[in-house]
Amino acid sequence: MCGTTSRLTRLFKIIAILPDEYFLIEKHVLKMKDNYILFVVSKDAAIIDGAFDEALK
């Protein structure tokens, strides 16, 4: 349990330093369509997601 606590402490320190980046990771897009996989971590994830769907119609 001590190792887990240590990892969580490091994670919380990283989150405190990089709140904008953490928000982007929380709002990621991960989807599959046919043989394609889309993984997006971006402030424009919704736009990219839409373009992905349009491209594979």
Image: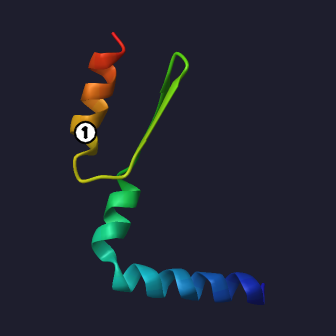
Q: Viewed as shown, does residue 15 lie left or right of 11? A: left
Figure disc tally: 1
**Residue 32: x and y, percent?**
50, 27
Picture quadrant where residue 14 is located = bottom left
For numbered disc 1, what is the local secondary structure?
A: helix
Q: Which residue is mark 1?
A: 46
Residue at 33 percent across and 9 percent down: it is 57
Residue at 34 percent across and 78 percent down: it is 18
Q: Viewed as shown, does residue 4 lie left or right of 9? A: right
Q: Quadrant of the N terminus?
A: bottom right
Height in image: 23 above or below 49?
below
Q: Viewed as shown, does residue 34 lie left or right of 40? A: right
Residue at 27 percent across and 18 percent down: it is 54
Give the camera-side residue of 37 and 14: 37
**Residue 44: x and y, percent?**
22, 46
**Residue 28: x and y, percent?**
39, 49
Height in image: 37 above or below 53?
below
